[in-house]
Image (spheres, coloured by chain):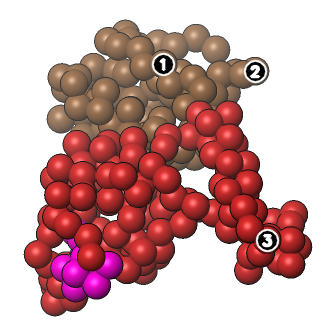
Amino acid sequence: MALIATKGTLDMAYPPLILASTAAAFGYEVTVFHTFWGLDILHEEHSADLKLSSVGNPNMPVPNVVGALPGMDRVTTRMMERRIDDNDTATVGELVETALEMGVEFQACQMTIDLLDYDEDDFFDGVTTGVGAATAVQDMAEADIQLLV
Amino acid sequence: MSVEFDIAETLDVKGASCPMPVIETKAATDGLVEGEVLEVLATDPGSVSDIDGWAAGTDGVKLLEQVEGEDVYQHYVRRTE
């Protein structure tokens, strides 16, 4: 299975991690190519501090005009973090570590590492760096399941 | 409901939510030898469909039975190879 993870908000970090670890449990070889803000999922420090915004999400009970006020992203993020905790849902970091232990290959796109001025050492141990779009295309060509998240 | 097989190991994942019941079940069955049965105790209602789907799509394991109790879902998985 080959996934592409492009988003780095707290809510969007979960789908690729849950699908990757579950597919590994099925015995699939799994690669997840992280690019743009998806890199933050693999970033050891940033992954513990991913944010959620109510702006642009009409399903959240906060009007956009209120959600855009300073500090509101922190409020909605706290709200979601509390729910994750109450529900005994694994944290993003725990899911990354679990998936790595199961043999999931997490790839950090080199072009966006350079673009966002990240360092190879910023990522969890075991994350593959020095890869680009051709690696992702090759993995997708060989996979039974391909998905962009 | 009575269970008619020997249980080699019990995995307690009560309280854990998706994807952990399946992930932990996979890890626990990896530790069994062929023929042994794992009992999984979960509270996640999604575990009924998820463990069924995982076992159906995974080589070397077979779901024998699922018991839906009042609060706890019991799953019985045999390692087949």
Instruction: Identify the residue position indicated by label 2 in the image.
Output: B70
| Amino acid type indicated by mark 2 | Glu
- The chain drawn in red is A
Q: Is residue A126 visible?
A: yes
**Mark 2 closeness class: few <14, some 14–19, many ≥20 residues within 10 Å:** few
Q: As displayed, is residue A2 above or below residue A88?
A: below
Question: Mark 2 falls on what kind of element?
Answer: loop
Mark 3 belongs to which subunit?
A: A
| Amino acid type indicated by mark 1 | Asp
Image coordinates of residue B25 in percent, x first then y, are 38, 32
> Residue visible at 86% across and 66% down?
A62
> Residue visible at 72% across and 22% down?
B71
Image coordinates of residue B31 in percent, x first then y, are 22, 24
Question: Mark 3 falls on what kind of element?
Answer: loop
Instruction: Identify the residue position indicated by label 1 in the image.
Output: B12
Kindly check if marks 3 and 2 are in contact, taking CB atoms under 8 A apart as contact: no
The dominant secondary structure in magenta is helix
